[in-house]
Image: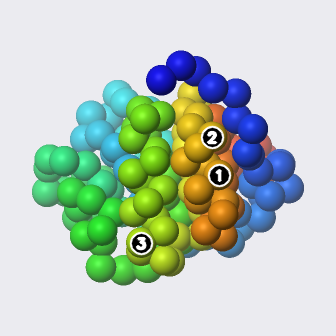
């Protein structure tokens, strides 16, 4: 997939509201490698008070939390998915969010855009953020 410009995206005020409202964040693609962006972002979010749920194909625990293999396996309510996956994976992730029915926010990290998946998530009632780092946005709001 070629790089896309996000045609569907939250405003700065919406991002501020999202970060104030969500409590539980499923981090899709959360690497156990502490040098990776997904790890550093999830660790930051955990340290500022969010409940982090790692979703990764291997490992049993990351950041002291039980790892799930898929979004579908998570047994508790998920407010937001924070996605560290390639853009072409976002269609299936949007479908999984819709199937769950409890995801309020579909957040694709910096450099990740899939407007088709974003439109699907938006039509299902989710707030959508693309090509923004949740850690950077949180820090900007709280400084």
**Where is 121 relative to 41, above or below?**
below
| Residue 31: x %, y % from top left | 29, 40
| Residue at the image point whose x is 59% and y is 44% from the top | 116
| Residue 12: x %, y % from top left | 83, 48
Name the secondary structure under disc 2: helix
Confirm whether residue 87 shows in the render: yes
Name the secondary structure under disc 3: helix
Q: Which residue is mark 3?
A: 99
The image quadrant that residue 8 belongs to is top right
Q: Which residue is mark 1?
A: 119
Q: Which residue is mark 2?
A: 115
| Residue at the image point whose x is 42% and y is 53% from the top | 93
Confirm whether residue 49 shows in the render: no
**Where is 80 relative to 107, above or below?**
below
**Where is 112 relative to 95, above or below?**
above
| Residue at the image point whose x is 48% and y is 56% from the top | 94
Asked if the residues shown at circle 2 and circle 1 are in contact, with their CB atoms under 8 angstroms apart, the answer is: yes
Asked if the residues shown at circle 2 and circle 3 are in contact, with their CB atoms under 8 angstroms apart, the answer is: no
Residue 84's disc number:
none
| Residue 3 relative to residue 51: left or right | right
Name the secondary structure under disc 1: helix
Ranked by sequence position, the earlier of labels 2 and 3 is 3
Q: Residues within 10 Å of mark 1 (few under 14, many from 20)?
A: some
Ranked by sequence position, the earlier of labels 1 and 3 is 3
């Amino acid at each position: 997939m070629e790089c896309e410009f996000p045609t569907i995206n939250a405003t700065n005020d919406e991002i501020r509201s999202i970060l104030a409202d969500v409590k539980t964040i499923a981090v899709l693609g959360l690497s156990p490698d502490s040098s990776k962006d997904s790890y550093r972002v999830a660790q930051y979010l955990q340290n500022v008070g969010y409940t982090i749920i790692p979703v990764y194909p291997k490992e049993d625990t990351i950041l002291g939390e039980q790892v799930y293999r898929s979004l579908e396996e998570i047994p508790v309510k998920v407010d937001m998915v924070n996605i560290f996956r390639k853009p072409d994976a976002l269609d299936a992730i949007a479908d999984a969010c819709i199937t769950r029915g409890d995801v309020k926010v579909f957040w694709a990290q910096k450099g990740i855009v899939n407007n088709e998946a974003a439109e699907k998530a938006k039509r299902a009632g989710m707030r959508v953020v693309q090509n923004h780092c949740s850690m950077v946005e949180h820090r900007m709001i709280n400084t």
